[in-house]
Amino acid sequence: MNPNDIERAKNAAAVLAVRENLRNNMILGIGSGSTIIGAVREIANIVNSNNWNIICVPTSYQAKSLITEKNLFLGSLDQYPELDLAIDGVDEITYNLEAIKGGGGCLVQEKIIATCAKRVIAIGDWRKISNQLGENWKKGVPVEIIPEAQVPLTHRLEKMGGKAKLREGKAKIGPLITDNGNFILDVDFGKISDPEKLDSQLKSLTGVVDSGLFIKIIDKVYIGLKDGNVEILD
């Protein structure tokens, strides 16, 4: 798999998504991850070229850094609790627009931003699309948890048929710590036949903050293809 093809596909999806959906005077939620970099770059190009007034609300420290790096106007949910649009990447998405997110560790903030937005646009490349969640994304469903609940939740998730693995930090020994000070369990349920039911079950467990299952949240997705074209699912 050629990395250049992947980057070209990501960028094509990001650019088209921004050009088709960005409007002047929007309050915009900005997602996290590598895919969003091209989107923020295109937002900055449009804002600077047209002298538009766009307020950007980030989902993570990374998103905040991208916004300030491009000299875009930075806002927060405290100031703007209702957003016009949110743009974010996905780890896997079906043709029914059910998605898994949270590979970058920001799933709770991303879901908060998404549920505050009137419309949610997702962007990704051809590797992200599947017929059923768990088909292509093999790392499991990210579940953000309160640290003290790690061991009991691991047992409960195993009883539900999942294989739970504590996500480790990359640059240090020990677990990854989210921006909220929590842990993430990556829970492998295999192919997920009923994502909405599973999401409800996960969120009902004491100690779970939220799951990386995004169900009935995403309105439209732009998928960059190997040939440089973009497939749109609405």
Image (cartoon, rainbow, N blue to C red):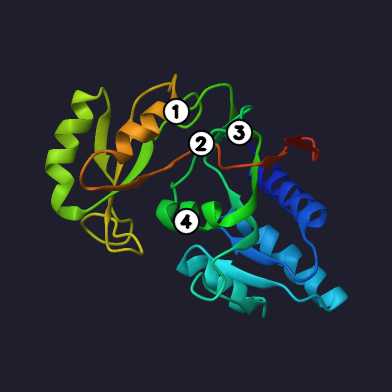
Residue 140 in sight from this viewpoint: no
Q: CA distance from mark 1 to mark 2?
A: 7 Å
Q: Is residue 159 above or below residue 24?
A: above
Q: Quadrant of residue 172?
A: bottom left
Q: Position of residue 62 (x, y in %)?
A: 50, 67
Label located before the other in sequence (3 or 1): 3
Identity of the residue drawn at 53% across and 52% down: 115
Q: Which mark is residue 112?
A: 4
Q: CA distance from mark 2 to mark 3?
A: 8 Å
Q: Secondary structure at mark 2?
A: loop
Q: Depth check: give the residue in front, 145 or 5.
A: 145
* Kind of residue sitting beneath label 3: Leu
Q: Quadrant of residue 130?
A: top right
- Give the number of the mark in front: 4 or 3: 4
Q: CA distance from mark 4 to mark 1?
A: 19 Å
Q: Which residue is mark 1?
A: 195
Q: Secondary structure at mark 3?
A: loop
Q: Are marks 4 and 3 in contact (CB under 8 Å)?
A: no
Q: Is residue 73 above or below residue 169?
A: below
Q: Are marks 1 and 2 in contact (CB under 8 Å)?
A: yes
Image quadrant where one finds the C terminus: top right
Around disc 1, counting alpha carbons within 10 Å, would you say few (fewer than 14), some (14 to 19), or many (20 or more)? some
Label located before the other in sequence (1 or 2): 1
Around disc 4, counting alpha carbons within 10 Å, would you say few (fewer than 14), some (14 to 19), or many (20 or more)? few
Q: Depth check: give the residue in front, 163 or 152.
A: 152
Q: CA distance from mark 3 to mark 1?
A: 11 Å
Identity of the residue drawn at 19% across and 54% down: 147
Identity of the residue drawn at 36% across and 34% down: 200
Q: Is residue 212 left or right of residue 94?
A: left
Q: Which residue is mark 3?
A: 97
Label located before the other in sequence (2 or 3): 3
Label located before the other in sequence (4 or 1): 4
